[in-house]
Image: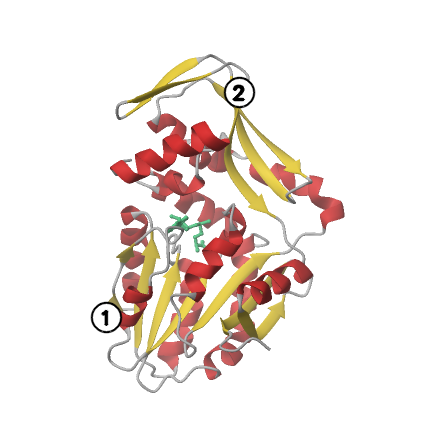
Amino acid sequence: MKLTKRQEAELVTAIQGRGEVPLKFAYLGEGAGKWDKIAKDRSEGGGINSVEGNLLKKRINDFISTLNTSKGVNLVDIGCGNGSPACPIIEELLSRNIKVTYVPMDISSDMLELSTKTISQKFEGIESKPIEIDFELGQFSDVMYDIKQNGSVNLMIFLGSTLGNHSDLTRVLSNFRDSMTSKDYLIVGVELTNLTKVSKIIPHYEGDNVKNLVTHTLKYLKVDHYEVEASWNEKYSQIEMRAKITNPIEVQVSSEKFTLEKDESILLARSIKFTEYAVTKLFSDVGFRTELLTTSEDRGYILTMVQPTRYSI
Ligand SMILES: C[S@@+](CC[C@H](N)C(=O)[O-])C[C@H]1O[C@@H](n2cnc3c(N)ncnc32)[C@H](O)[C@@H]1O
């Protein structure tokens, strides 16, 4: 893992200011392989990637027929992971002889490599245009504008319930909204939770693969003595993974030094749990109109296709 000067500054500020190690850094370097293991687990029967993939396949016709595909589609896979979740969409576009350019967008160059490899192995000859970007830092309309110079349409996808990992959902979604024209579409996949049964999902966060990923940045900081715990935060409606420091340690990042005290609790990851009402309200409040919305049979997963609202109604 290698952080830029800016990322180091963001990391130190987040630890000292909020007691948080932002999860996004965990995906850098070997973190990409650590995520790949989790993604493979989640693709097996009942895992959220498999539920999402089935729902996507079921409703793919509706999603695609909404688009003007005559000049081709740029599939912008925001937070691409290993690229697998994009496959059902690419498969369907190609089967209709629609030209597809795969545009994985991620903070991690290793993840970009992984996703490009997945897609090029599965779909021979497909063009990929990977973009290394931190989408939390601001809008990226320049990138979105560049890729559609030939008259093609941008279809952005934000899958795998990644939305729930962010502290400021409005900021992330506003960055997406401000990067889109009124012809672009965004598909977001989010896990829904019955909030009365939330204690049952805590064990999903206690496996070794998840722990390996979320503690990746602690290893970069050379922090070795901690216990990882998953718990439910009622106030923010989120599962939290925290490291409880068991031995005090002086941490050095660049020229900055600080101490993590024994029993200090550092937030490593959050997974906000949504209801259908909360998701639809969030998109509407940020300034998106909903074109399509579909939920899995057991109401455990929602896919929504949205566009920026041009006029407030
Ligand atoms: C939970 S994984 C989901 C991956 C994939 N979409 C899936 O459904 O399997 C989150 C992905 O978003 C990327 N990511 C997280 N925060 C990011 C940020 N601020 N900017 C760019 N990429 C980010 C991670 O590197 C990772 O690939």
Q: Secondary structure at mark 1?
A: loop
Q: Quadrant of residue 89?
A: bottom left
Give left or right: position of 303 versus 148. Answer: right
Give left or right: position of 277 versus 118. Answer: right
Q: Quadrant of residue 76?
A: bottom left
Q: Report which residue position mark 1 lands on.
A: 125
Q: Quadrant of the N terminus?
A: top left
Percent position (x, y) of residue 118?
32, 58
Q: Residues within 10 Å of mark 1 (few under 14, many from 20)?
A: few
The front one of 162 and 96 is 162
Percent position (x, y) of residue 251?
36, 19
Q: How is the image coloured?
A: secondary structure
> Is 39 located above or below residue 308 in the figure?
above
Query: Which residue: 60% across, 63% down?
Result: 302
The amino acid type found where label 2 is placed reads: Glu
Q: Which mark is residue 210?
A: none
Query: Which residue: 52% across, 45% down?
Result: 167
The amino acid type found where label 1 is placed reads: Gly
The front one of 11 and 72 is 11
> Is 308 located above or below residue 163 in the figure?
below
Percent position (x, y) of residue 312?
56, 75
The front one of 45 and 94 is 94
Distance of mark 1 from mark 2, alpha carbons? Answer: 51 Å
Give left or right: position of 280 versus 157. Answer: right
Q: Earlier in the sequence, mark 1 or mark 2?
A: 1
Q: Report which residue position mark 2 lands on.
A: 264
From the viewer's perspective, is the residue at label 1 or at label 2 nearer?
Answer: 2
Query: Which residue: 60% across, 78% down?
Result: 313
